[in-house]
Amino acid sequence: MTRFLKSSILGAATLALSMSSALAVDLEFYFPVAVGGEAAATIQALTDAYVAENPDVNINAIYTGSYADTTTRAITAARGGNAPHLAILLSVDMFTMIDEDIVEAWDDYLSEDEIENWIGGFYPAFMKNSQTEGKTWGIPFQRSTPVIYWNKEAFEAAGLDPETPPTTWDEMVEMGQQLTIRDDAGNVTQWGVRIPSSGFPSWLFTGLVAANGQDGLANDAGTEVYFDTPEVVEALEYLVSLSTEHEIMAPGILDWGATPRAFMDGESAIAWTTTGNLTNIRNNAPFEFGVGMLPAKVRPGAPSGGGNFYLFSGHSEEEVLAAIDFVKWATAPEQAAEWSIATGYVAPREDTWETDAMREYAQEVPGALVARDQLEYAVAELATFEGPRVTQILNDNIAAAVVGDKSPAEALADAQREADAILAPYRQ
C-alpha cells in the first residue's frame, strides 16, 4: 500500500480515534492455537473485553487453526487484497512476511516514547525473532521456550530425588535409565524421556544446539544457516543416542501433539515441550510434576519460540491505529498476566511479572518462573528467508537421522547444502 505520512499525522489520527466517529472501526484478527487448554476461549474473552471498553471498535477474532494454517490463510487473504488487520503468527515467520511485503513495521506508527518504553519493554530474548535491520516486525505475545516436565511420583518410585530434575545431558541419560521400566517380557511400560521429533522438531533441537554452545542455527539477517558445525552434529548424535544407544526414549518419530498426553498418562517420566503447555498439564496431570530448564552440555540454553502480533498492510490509518491500540492493550500488564496464567505462555514483559496477579500465580505455580528465568540463556529460534522450506529441510534430515536412514553427520551435511542453495540469492 502507499503509506500515509505516519509521523506527521500520528497525533491528529490518534485524537480522531479517541473522539470516536459515528461508525465503529471494524478489525479482523486471525489467531492460532498450538497447545491444549483454554487458549482460544481466553483470546476471545480478551477481545470481547477490549471491545466493551472501546465501543468505537469492533474486532472479529477468528480462530484459524494451527500456526501453519493461520500463516497460509493470512498470506492468501493478503494476496487477494483482503488481509486481516492483525494476526498472531510464529515469530520465525518474520522473514516470510517481509518477503511477501504484506506487513508493516510497527516502529513507523509509533512515537519515540512508545518505541523506547513499549517496544523496549519486551524481553530482549523475544525481540531476537521480532526485529531485523533496525525495524520491529512482530510484537511478542504468545511466546514460549521449551522446558522439561518431570513426573515427581515416577522419580520417587525410581529412587530419585523428586525435587531434582536432570540439569545436564549426562544426568538425563543416567536418570532416564533409572526411569525406564520394562515388564517381564521386556516391553517398555514407562520411558525415561520423550523429545518430540514431529511438529516443531527444529525448535526443540535448537535447545540441544544451544546447550552445546552454539548461538542458534542462523544469522540475524536470515541469509545463512549453520547446520553442519561440530556442535550441531554432536547435538543430533546425542538426540539419536537416547533411543539407539541408551534406550531411554521410544524409537522412531515421536508426535508433538501427543506429548502432553503421553506425559500425563505416564508413558514418559520426562517430557520436552513448550511452557505453553503448563496450564494444560497443571489442570490434567494426575500426579505431582516439576518444570525445569533444558539440560546443559557446555552451558544452559534454549530457543525462544511462539507467536507475535503482525500488523498487515492495506488498511486505512484509522484502522491501523485502532489495531495498534488493541495490541498495546493486550500486551499491557493486566491483560498479559491474564493470558499467561490462562495458558502457561511466558509473560513477555517484566512489568507483567510485577502485577499482583502474576506474583500470586508465581507463588502458587513456581514452574511458571522457569521459562522466564531461562530467557537469560535463550537464543533465537531458526528463522530465515524462505523459512518454511529451510526449516522443513532441517526437520526432514533430523527425522532421517532419528529413524536411521542417515547418520547425523550425513543428515546435517545434506541439510546445509540444500539450505545454502535456497538462501544463495539472498546473500547477493
Image (cartoon, rainbow, N blue to C red):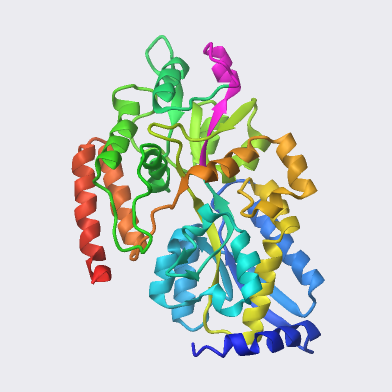
- Which quadrant of the figure has residue 19? bottom right
- Horizontal side of 161 relative to 198 (left or right) equals right
Q: Quadrant of residue 284?
A: top right
| Above-or-below relation of 336 to 288 | below
**Residue 340 visible, this orientation:** yes
- Name the residue rendered at 77%, 88% in the picture: 21
Q: Is residue 314 left or right of residue 183?
A: right
Along the line of sight, which residue is nearer the eye, 336 or 349?
A: 349
Determine which quarter of the picture holds residue 277.
top right
Looking at the image, which residue is at 53% across and 55% down?
124
- Residue 42 location (% of width, % of height): 69, 55
* Residue for point 21% across, 57% down: 418
Range covered by the magenta-colored residues: 146-163
The question of residue 175 being in magenta is answered with no
Tell me if residue 155 comes above or below residue 60 in the rendering: above
Residue 65 appears in the rendering:
no
